[in-house]
Amino acid sequence: MIKDKLDKILLKVQKPSRYIGGEVNSVIKDKSKVDLRYAFCFPDTYDIGMSHLGMKILYSLKNSKPNYWCERVFMPLPDMEEAMRENDIPLYGLESLDPIKDFDFIGFTLQYELCYTNVLSMLDLAGLPVYSKDRKDLFPIVMGGGPCVCNAEPIADFFDLFVLGEGEEVNLELMELALSFKKNGGTKQEFLEKAAQIEGVYVPSLYEVSYNDDGTVSDITPKCGAPAKVKKRIIADFDSVYSPDNFVVPFTQIVHDRSVVEVLRGCIRGCRFCQAGFIYRPFREKSKKTIVEQVKNLTESTGYDEVSLCSLSTSDYSDIEGLLCDITDYTDAKGVNLSLPSLRIDNFSDEVVKKIKSVRQSGLTFAPEAGSQRLRDVINKNITEDDIMKSCKIAFEGGYSSVKLYFMLGLPTETLDDIAAIKTLADKIIDIYYTVERHSKRGISISISLSTFIPKPFTPFEFEPQATKEQIDERQKYLLDIVRSKGGKRIDVSWSHYETTILEAVFARGDRRVSAVIYDAWKNGCKLDGWNEYFKPEIWDQAFINTGIDKTFYANRARSYDEIAPWDHMDMLFTKEFLIEENKKAHDEKTTPHCREKCAGCGINKCLGKACFNYGK
Amino acid sequence: MENNTTAIRIFFSKTGRAKYISALDLINCIQRALRRTDIPVWHTQGFNPHTYVNINLPLSLGTEGVKESMDIKLTENMSFSDVKDKLNAVLPADIKVTEVAQPVKKHTEIEKSVYGIVIKCNMDKLKEFLNLPAIEVEKKTKRGISTVDLKPHITVEDITDDRFVLYLPSGCDFTINPSLLFDAYEKYSGEEIEKIDIVRNKILCKDGTEFE
């Protein structure tokens, strides 16, 4: 039994409680009484995966069916993985401690590209072949979901199927189909062909991809009746979408150790670099009543003393102040903290500051993304310097004295003038600080965090090259020099590593041939690539050499508008023409108003059968 | 501030999967469990008020306990059986409240833990080890690493071919963690213990009576 073997190793690994289950609200069922068993895998550690809202929703949803049992599975850290391999412990579900290779479904949520080697590690640790073609039996069905599925080509060979878009309905439809196969029999091929008929299901083995001599895709051909385009699933009636009324409460501290309530999906902003802003369209909100009720339910069932609202750009909720009033009426009375992680600069009102001030005070974080107004217009980050200054002033008056600013380097059309503008902006924020009477004696500290822009599919910048390492190095150095030359003491600059960034860029826009690199790197020991301490750039470099794959072809190459993209058979319900128009406007330095102000004509409203907003007035 | 509060002692078992919950995580777990109930608990009155929970003698990681205890304070009356039932309804599966009572002794009176050991290893070798004139081990203390002779501090009773009762000092002044002894045995014998279950069955006070 796995439990006995675990008892032998758990005291030798760090934080053993994350490997043994048994938490409050974890779901235990009698396995002789369930029809389907689902291993919900988060391809990163427990501490990260347990913080993820999507997993909580789908876990509870599946378990709400008495005849389905869904369990949680995470990526063990190297100390645990080693101990498991030494003691012949296959990857197991945290609820039953049974090996997941005996389950009916193994589902991975694919939240970011750097988790791909973890998927292979977990399949291997489960005792399964990593390539779909080598898993001959129908069960377990290995499936993937999450934002990376909008271009899953680099990992297509490892999966039996993917679900595109929101999972609440399509997961259950797939499980129903699997149940009928379990009862009536059928092969893996028969199942996959049937599954491909479900809207939102992508079966990669039913598509033939061919290439031109220059390496670009020439054709993507569906087989066996699979649809030419896989349509993303969305939940039209978002207010009544399934939402869990309890969460598994971990014993050990995790990254986001609190309850989380989703308030809206989609984003009205249309920032041109932001994949989430496009792929989660259309914009939909939950009603105040629903949100407040969920805050109450979760607080009572988990015992957490903190609740956070989750969405893209939370302050775009149509009645954010009313919502915060209603929530704080409850949370204040209960002594529960409310946190709002995703606020935009421009609608950062006095009222909102007061509300989050009643929450424990920490630093403020803003993401202007670009230093100059010109470049902010290019990326359609529709905020002005005035907005930033106004918000900072409000925050400083509210007692804040540290500000974190996020910027991207390597944005399309970026010049050194745009880089210099980052420092100018920071200087102006410092000046504002000293105009505020209540400033503290310690003074202000500003930290500038630089990431490297990664062009992503289904954004207006999907055609753009990523800046090269030389370009990024030059721009970083330029900024550091001007920060250090004067007034640098109050400004701290940090940046991301180019090595992981370019990997992410290759996977984001890669085609099926890229899977060879992922396999080779994993075989040679790469995993947990998102963790600095485990990332092995030299093995990745070697993997590109071994497989003859040129990373610059995927990362640093500009695409023409008429090139067939590896993800062109995915239909995210808005048009490619819209992306092309937005790309042209970016190069013309023209902005697009947000969706609530004026419809930008992306085409998403077709799936709603009406306009996204009431433009009547 | 503490005027109208009543201290109560909650006895509980922590077994099975729960033996991997660290002492610190256990406090967090209990505080959250209390928040899932309407038990009128007293909160510390500092800048960041939190639910007052005192674990009288933390259990080391990997050890089960059948009569562990913690103290909380009530701000209003609630019957002991209500507290017990309400907590049991919300605790994780492997933590169970067995009894709620008025505290009789202070936790500073605690002196010893009584463990039940079930072990799979070379028993003759283990007996030989336990009969050594001295068992010197390195022990981490607040002041660094020092060498301690465990021998005068341990008492072994009722030894059979797979189990025995072990008394070890526990408390504010001096504590010996059972793993210290078994690690020393593995070092001495060169053998890896195949399987071991350690359960704390009792906590004894300086006057020899049970902690209650």
Image (cartoon, helix red, strand yellow):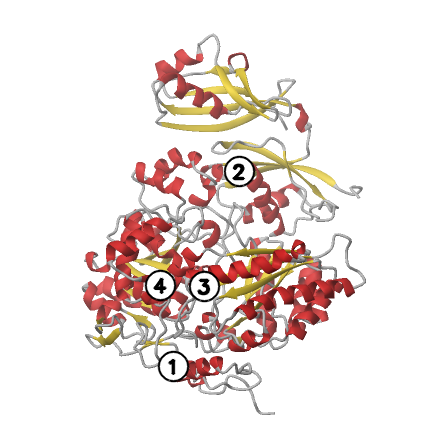
Between tags 1 and 3, which lies in front? 3
Q: Position of residue B190 (x, y in %)?
A: 35, 19
Residue at 64 percent across and 25 percent down: it is B172
In the displayed image of the protein, which residue is found farthest to the top? B133
Residue placed most toward the observer, A153 or A608: A153
| Picture quarter with the C terminus of chain A | bottom right
Mark 4 or mark 1, whichever is nearer to me: 4
SS label for mark 1: helix
Left or right, residue A192 beside residue B10: left
The residue sitting at 22% across, 76% down in the picture is A221
Q: Which chain letter goes with mark 4?
A: A
The residue mark sitting in front, 2 or 3, is 3
Q: CA distance from mark 1 to mark 3?
A: 29 Å
Q: Secondary structure at mark 4?
A: helix
Disc number placed over residue A506 in the picture, else none:
4
Q: Residue A22 at what x, y percent from top left?
A: 46, 46
Pointer 1 and pointer 2 on the same chain: no
> What residue did someone put label 2 on?
B22
Q: Amino acid at mark 1?
A: Lys
Look at mark 1 in the image and give the residue it sits on: A576
Q: CA distance from mark 4 to mark 2?
A: 42 Å
Which residue position is annotated with label 3? A471
Separation (CA) of disc 4 from disc 3:
17 Å
Q: Which secondary structure lies at badge 2? A: loop
Check if mark 4 and mark 1 are on a common chain. yes
Mark 4–mark 1 Cα distance, whole angstroms, equals 21 Å
Label 2 with label 3: CB-CB less than 8 Å: no
Whole-percent x and y of residue A500? 41, 56
Identify the image quadrant of residue A41. Answer: bottom left
Rendered-image quadrant of the N terminus of chain A: top left
